[in-house]
Amino acid sequence: MEIYAESLTEYKRLATLEVKVGDLLLGDFNPIRIQTMTTTDTMDTIATVEQSIKCIEAGSELIRITAPSKNEAENLLNIKTELRKRGYNIPIVADIHFTPNAAEIAARIVEKVRVNPGNYVDKKKFELLEYSDAEYMEEIERIRYRFTPLVKICKEYGTAMRIGTNHGSLSDRIMSRYGDTPIGMVESAMEFLRIAESENYYNIVLSMKSSNPQVMVQAYRLLIQNMHAELKHCYPLHLGVTEAGDGEDGRIKSAIGIGTLLEDGIGDTIRVSLTEDPELEIPVCRNIVKRYSQPPQTPPKEGLAKTQSRVNEFEDSLENKKANSATNERKFELAESSKSLSKGEGFRERQPYSPFEYKRRETFEVNNIGAKHVPVVIADLHKIDKIKPEDLEAIGYTYDIVTDKWNISDLAADYIFTADQLIDFDLPGTLKIICYYNLWLASADKEKYFPIFDEQQYLDDNISKSFVTNFVMLDCYSEGYPEIDLEKIILKLRQDKTSVICLSSTNKNSVQSIRRMFIDLSQQEVKNPIVIITDGTNESMDENLIHYAVEAGALLLDGFGDGICLGHRFAEKKVTTDYKLLNSIAFGILQASRTRISKTEYISCPSCGRTLFDLQETTSRIRAVTNHLKGVKIAIMGCIVNGPGEMADADFGYVGSGPGKITLYKGKEIVKRAVSEDVAVSELINLIKENEAWVEP
Ligand code: SF4
């Protein structure tokens, strides 16, 4: 195993234990399960049942319902009974924060409980306290005391459990020792996992969610590495990006985070959290999971027998350990293991990049590509018969006849690919053209037009090259394609400071193929900038959006890529390309991977039974007045119980704190309490202005 995945250069699913949630099996090469969460009041049995049915009929295989207190936990029985009466036997998951009592009731009723280790026992105070080793162990013992009863109930009733860590709600204890980091998230889950295993309870799923896909991906990878190192087995993983927001941005963010891990073969169930009706999350999940429905390599399925034998092996080793060690020694072991969590050290010796921390691949600069430049966006316009000034509106440039000037938006593409077409009007100064060699030869302006070569043309010394910028297309190990002479190309690229490499692959799982080329080029010290070319071949743009986000996003999160170009190659001529949408998706991918910030970032919760206002309507009102604030992160959260913790790295927060009341935050600090909902959006704007983050639209 490559430290956290079966392989980094071909698609292979990670082996995990198998978990039983009611009649549904999770992990151990079972299909990747799809799930969502209701947004109704849990005390409203019929509304919750009806919303659950909508989700089930859309394809959800598990339904999560919030249980903030004992009353809601008890009402899960009515919901379950009504669902079963109506013929729906889907497993129900109770979502628990802060209330062990509610968890212990729910665990006797539903098929699975989700606990958040950051707040199951601890109250989040945002205090950075210093803990001595003895104090730290005292806290762990306190958790053991409060958490063990739930484990015992789950064991007795055959209830599954998710230990669901969130980046934004780590306990003060974890924060004091590990900070707000992926490794802190891992340890937060490991503390609970060790307690569960000490009770011989293994029906567990884990998650490591964050609203930042970079943090989320790193945390899952570290968790797997640590489970393998410490436990010698791996639990099934529930994947999700929290507070992803809504619309296109929410879908892109989710697809990048979830898809990057699924490409690694990681993930056994997924939830896409959108600030929309929960049934709308399901088609997005399906489009993501579809990509892995027939994995090329599926190890032989041994099912429960395998899980049981792994667990038996583990229990034997645990029994031996117990027999040989006094309680104090065990405490010492736990303390030591919590200190020595692996942070992925050693990986770099074998690979030229780290999957556990973001570091952009080192390159030199060619024109405005590579080195310190943000990744560029190349718009592929070659299918437009004759490109006119108005065609550039879709890619961020609007020509104003009165002033005879181009207005350039924050989402303006940097290059256009025209293939064989010369442009017969004056282009905006910042926009450059990539075209085929013969056209480049014929073009008068060699500062504006740059040639793109295939591998043969690039190696042919009789073909002249630009002194400024060249683009070289390289296929990455596509099946059925003739092999390229990589050795010769590498030798030439190493001497060539004018060429940008464009990588693509037609393989089903092209992320692995392109990653393999990145690794091969990096190991050979090739430092030319690289553009990732991703073509969508689906008729539906919803599916293409997921495809682009996963294929380009997964590479960008690992620090690969100095630009992206999204193409649409649908065979049917009648399908026209929506260039505006493609351009917007390209910038959305760069924003979600945090490699180029060009718009406002919204961190909005999906809402649930705790929500205190209409989240969808409020999010769109806030978006309408703030969407010109490039780079500002605004959180819109439904409740004060979880909202402040979950909004992690937002600059400003709008959080429901009571019926009709909003609390406003600057970072994690409360600035205005109990603001009436009627004026809360204008008060938010005032707050942004007071902090000099406002610009006029
Ligand atoms: S932050 Fe939103 S989704 Fe999370 S518990 Fe509160 S209302 Fe529910």
Image (spheres, helix red, strand yellow):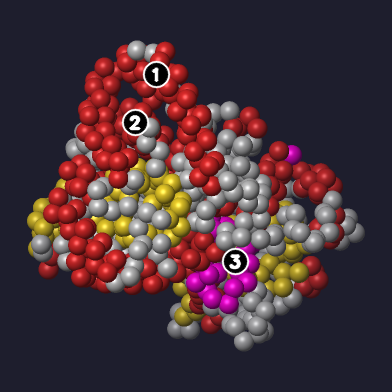
Residue 396 x %, y % = 49, 71
Characterize the local packing of mark 2: few (<14), some (14-19) or many (20 or more) Cα atoms within 10 angstroms.
Answer: few
Name which of mark 1 and mark 2 comes first in the sequence.
2
Query: Do the residues under discs 2 and 3 have CB atoms within 8 angstroms?
Result: no
User: Does the segment drawn in magenta span residue 466?
Assistant: no
Residue denoted by label 2:
199
Please report the residue visible at 50 percent of the width from the left and 56 percent of the height from the top.
Answer: 32
Q: Which mark is residue 566?
A: 3
> Viewed as shown, does residue 45 lie left or right of 8?
left
| Placement of the C terminus among the 4 image quadrants | bottom left
Residue denoted by label 1:
322
Amino acid beneath label 3? Leu
Q: Is residue 90 above or below residue 529?
A: below
Amino acid beneath label 2? Glu
Please report the residue visible at 66 percent of the width from the left and 85 percent of the height from the top.
Answer: 573
Amino acid beneath label 1? Lys
Name the element at disc 1. Answer: helix
> Viewed as shown, does residue 30 lie left or right of 487?
left
> Viewed as shown, does residue 572 lie left or right of 293?
right
Please report the residue visible at 47 percent of the width from the left and 25 percent of the height from the top.
Answer: 316
Residue 202 x %, y % = 40, 38
Residue 457 x %, y % = 84, 61
Name the element at disc 2. Answer: loop
Residue 220 vs residue 65, the one in the foreground:
65
Residue 82 vs residue 485, the one in the foreground:
82
Residue 671 vs residue 182, the one in the foreground:
182
Magenta residues (range): 524-553
